[in-house]
Image: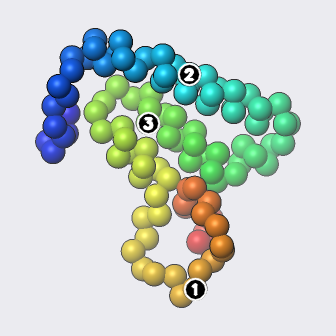
Amino acid sequence: MTPCALPSPRTGVELVDEYFIENRTRLLEVAAYLDRVDRAGDAGAGRDFRMRAFREALAVLAQDAPGRTERVQMVFSDPTTEPLPALDQKSARGAYDRWNEAV
């Protein structure tokens, strides 16, 4: 538990009892999404910066250590602090492209 986190009023078993099924469903949805991307047969999708970040986030989730929420958020976040001179596009991309040297 991180120092600023409040302790849960429920036990771990109570949390599993309450939330296991809905989170199992979420994992199955992620698995189905990845299967659909694979079946598309587009090798470029696997190299897309969003998919690279997605795989990194999955690796963070697999770690047995507290603080996963913050670490996953940081995988997708833009770490830069300098403002852009102009907006680079009209819609959000959902992940920062740290693999693109021009960004």
Of residues 20 and 101, the one drawn nearer to the viewer in this rendering: 20
Tell me the kind of residue under disc 3: Val
- Left or right: where 60 falls relative to 4: right
Residue 92 drawn above or below residue 26: below
Name the residue rendered at 45%, 81% in the picture: 83
Seen as rendered, the residue at the extreme bottom is: 85
Where residue 19 sits in the image (x, y, percent)?
40, 20
Q: Between marks 2 and 3, how big is the CA–CA gap?
A: 19 Å
CA neighbours of label 3 inside 10 A, class few (<14), some (14 to 19), many (20+): some
**Residue 60 numbered mark, or none:** 3
Q: Nearer the viewer, mark 2 or mark 1?
A: 2
Q: Secondary structure at mark 1?
A: loop
Query: Which residue is found at the position 85% from the left and 36% from the top?
Result: 41
State which mark lies toward you, 3 or 1: 1
Q: Earlier in the sequence, mark 2 or mark 1?
A: 2
In this rendering, position of residue 8 left or right of residue 87: left
Quadrant containing the C terminus is: bottom right
Residue 57 location (% of width, % of height) = 50, 40
Provide the secondary structure element on which disc 3 rests: helix
Mark 1 sits on what residue?
Answer: 86
Q: Provide residue 5's location: percent of width, then percent of height.
A: 18, 40
Q: How many angstroms separate mark 3 from mark 1 (CA)?
A: 33 Å
Looking at the picture, tell me which residue is in the foreground, 39 or 15: 15
- At label 2, which amino acid type do we have? Thr
**Which circle's residue, 3 or 1, is located before the other in the chain?**
3
The Cα–Cα distance between marks 2 and 1, rounded to whole angstroms, is 40 Å
Where is residue 16? Give x, y as percent: 35, 15
Q: Reading the chain from its start, which is encountered first: label 2 or label 3? A: 2
Q: Amino acid at mark 1?
A: Ala
Q: What is the secondary structure assignment of the residue under circle 2?
A: helix
Report the disc number at residue 25.
2
Q: Which residue shows up at 76% across the image and 36% down it? A: 37
